[in-house]
Image (spheres, rainbow, N blue to C red):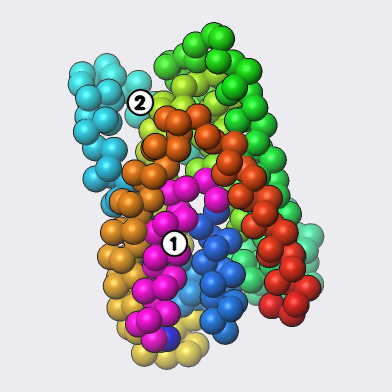
Amino acid sequence: MSLLKIIILAIVQGLAELLPVSSSAHVVVAEKLMGLDPSSPPMTLLLVMLHTGTMFAVIVYFWQRWRSTYFKSAPAFRNFAVLLVVATALTAVVGEAIKIVIEKTAFRNLPHAQIEDLFSHLELIAPALAAAGILILIAGIFEKRRSARAATDDLNLKHAGVIGAVQGLCLPFRGFSRSGATISTGMLLGVTKARAEDFSFALAVILTPPVVARETLRLMQSARINGTAELASAGLYSVFGAVVAFLAGLLALKWLSRWLEGGRWYLFGIYCLIAAAAVTALHRAGY
């Protein structure tokens, strides 16, 4: 793979990952248009390494807010850590359950198939994008109707559990935006947009390392079959892509925060619906 393609994918990922429009869907479409296989181990490792780049962008961008809110005292940090653990545990349970169901049904005649094999199917990405768009629209409408009464800035165990479960629904499906779904869920539960945004991206920081580990293991298993040269080149390209995604992610975060504060969340939902129609058209065109 050329460095130019890596840069293009990293920019797409960095700009889209931290916006509620599903970076994975955008990267998969870009890979398809460039003749790449989104479900191959090098491509899935690249994708999660791009996530790693944006994870560091999240830490840099939110650090001051997190430090003043969640690290101001031991009780505040302890409460925040409990919420993260509860949400992440439910993410793992829901995500793993869906993975098992898919493997036992859609993959029942394919003994060596993995969930990543679904990532290149545009006919699955389109409805996932549409579902995310509808959820974001509903949250945007709810936000406007709620304007007369203030949202709560408190995030309790119930909120964290529901948000974590919704995040678990996002994991197997490219197109069902993780940030869009989790932030929208928080808004629908009555949490302020800023608090839902903070919590959603904190969850992303927790979620990224195990996903990177899974995809690294998957590539290492592939390397035993195809040779270690694939592992070395994929690793180098992935690290380079992560750096580019980090820079693009910082820009995207600033834009997302402005849109959240401006009360235009629903526009992301409209975009997802348009994107779903475009992906459907690409699928019918043979991609």
Q: Which mark is residue 80?
A: 2
What secondary structure characterizes most of the magenta part?
helix
Name the foreground residue: 167 vs 102: 167
In the image, residue 282 above or below residue 171: below
| Residue 86 in sight here | no
In which image quadrant can residue 206 be found? top left
In which image quadrant can residue 188 be found? top right
Q: Position of residue 198 (x, y in %)?
A: 38, 33
Numbered disc 2: secondary structure: helix
**In the shown orientation, is residue 232 left or right of residue 187?**
left
Q: Residue at x 24, y 45 (%)?
A: 60
Residue indicated by mark 1 = 13
Amino acid marked by disc 1: Gln
**Which-is-in-front pick, marks 2 and 1?**
1
Q: Residue at x 47, y 48 (%)?
A: 19
Name the foreground residue: 89 vs 122: 122
Name the foreground residue: 28 vs 119: 28
In the image, residue 200 above or below residue 227: above
Q: Residues within 10 Å of mark 1 (few under 14, many from 20)?
A: many
Q: Position of residue 108 (x, y in %)?
A: 78, 66
**In the shown orientation, is residue 164 left or right of residue 209?**
right
Amino acid marked by disc 2: Phe
Q: Position of residue 62 (x, y in %)?
A: 29, 38
| Residue 44 in sight here | yes
Residues rendered magenta in the picture: 2-21
- Which corner quadrant holds the C terminus? bottom right
